[in-house]
Amino acid sequence: MQRLSARSLSSLATIGVLILTGCGTESGDPEGEAASVSAGRTLRAQKVMQLTQVHAETGMTLLEGPVFGDDGGLIVVDVTAPEGKPKVMRVDVAKKTSRAVHTDGEGAYTSAQFSPYDGRLYLSDFAHGEVVSLAPDGGDPRTFFSGEVDGARMNPDDIAFDQQGNLYVSDSRGLSEGKARGRVVRIDREGGGATVLAEELAAPNGISFDADYRGLWFSELTENRISYLRLDEKGEVTSRHTAIRVDGGLAQTDSIAVDADGNLYQGLHGRAAMAVYDRHGERLATVELPARAEGLESATNVAITPGGTKAYMTVSGPAGGYLYAFDALAEGTRQSNGG
């Protein structure tokens, strides 16, 4: 095993909290979970390929942040990849091949999105409270935002862009303490100003604009609920309410993607499945893995092919990190890349 610096060990401790209580790979009672999240029809996912194995250095692997680039490649991040292993990968889903795009010594990247403003790839670094950006090919790393927001450093989990390129972040602050200190934060597209749009949230995780960019859906992991934040043309909040209560049993709400019809795809931490709702909160379907799939315990996120309905889901557990595919209920758009 590679020797780790004190700072690296500190980062891994932070990641461990994230995995065990947030995005991760804990298992529960499969029968109990299935009974509690079986509403609607079943969409059966099929294995595309394995991307990662459990890393000896970190004791886990966790795939997140699937997002399609303009070249048709699917970008995926591995939250717990150690230094020297790919932290950002590009997948050719047709050829079932992948290649490393970026690695570094310390980042714990939990999401990825391409900006409509400058075309760069943006990554949230949960462990260090930063948002960084890369050129589309993975080069030219830059720090987009770092530091405190209203006197407190963020734990940025997922991200979403509005049409002008301003960034919206689910800040899971308070997760390790089990306290509702989370926030939704807006950062202007130049990275200069940050505004808290909602606070006192229970470990916010998934975040995505609705189909018309009128508001934000965001999930709160430790409350198993999805809320809706309505915004005006300036990106300021006009209302907020609890929209959906997810009956997940031992599973918890992870990332969110939205298709062209406004349907929500809610990832589940602690169960390798996704819950699908319409914009009115009706449970439409559950995305399930084949019964023979073993050692996979969380379906964190999904990206739907732009203009198509093939959806690619990131699934992780002791068996490694995998991509699974299923047929979505409507076509993919920018919001269909899970934050």
Image (spheres, rainbow, N blue to C red):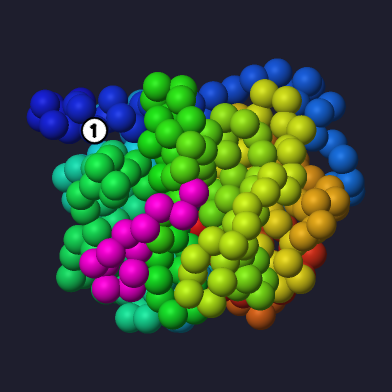
Query: Is residue 126 shown left or right of residue 217?
Result: left
Residue 7 versus residue 105 in the image, above or below: above
**Which quadrant of the structure image shows residue 112?**
bottom left
Residue picked out by circle 1:
11
- Please report the residue visible at 24 percent of the width from the left and 59 percent of the height from the top: 145
Helix, strand, or loop for circle 1? Answer: helix
Q: Is 188 in the magenta?
A: yes
Query: Is residue 41 shown left or right of residue 304?
Result: right
Percent coordinates x, y for residue 92 in the rendering? 48, 68
Q: Which of 220 and 41 is in front in this view?
A: 220
Residue at the far front: name it.
238
- Please report the residue visible at 49 percent of the width from the left and 66 percent of the height from the top: 236
Percent coordinates x, y for residue 76 in the rendering? 44, 57
- Please report the residue visible at 40 percent of the width from the left and 65 percent of the height from the top: 167
Q: Which of 314 and 160 is in front in this view?
A: 160
Q: Can residue 80 be seen in this view?
A: yes
Total numbered labels = 1
**Which quadrant of the structure image shows residue 75?**
bottom left
Label 1, residues with CA under 10 Å away: few <14, some 14-19, many ≥20? some
The range drawn in magenta is: 187-198
Q: Nearer the viewer, residue 65 or 294?
A: 65
Residue 164 versus residue 235 in the image, above or below: below
Percent coordinates x, y for residue 316 in the rendering? 53, 39
- Please report the residue visible at 78 percent of the width from the left and 20 percent of the height from the top: 32
Q: Is residue 49 visible?
A: no
Query: Is residue 266 shown left or right of residue 2?
Result: right
> Three-letter amino acid code at disc 1?
Ser
Q: Quadrant of the N terminus?
A: top left
Q: Is 289 in the magenta?
A: no
Query: Is residue 140 shown left or right of residue 237?
Result: left
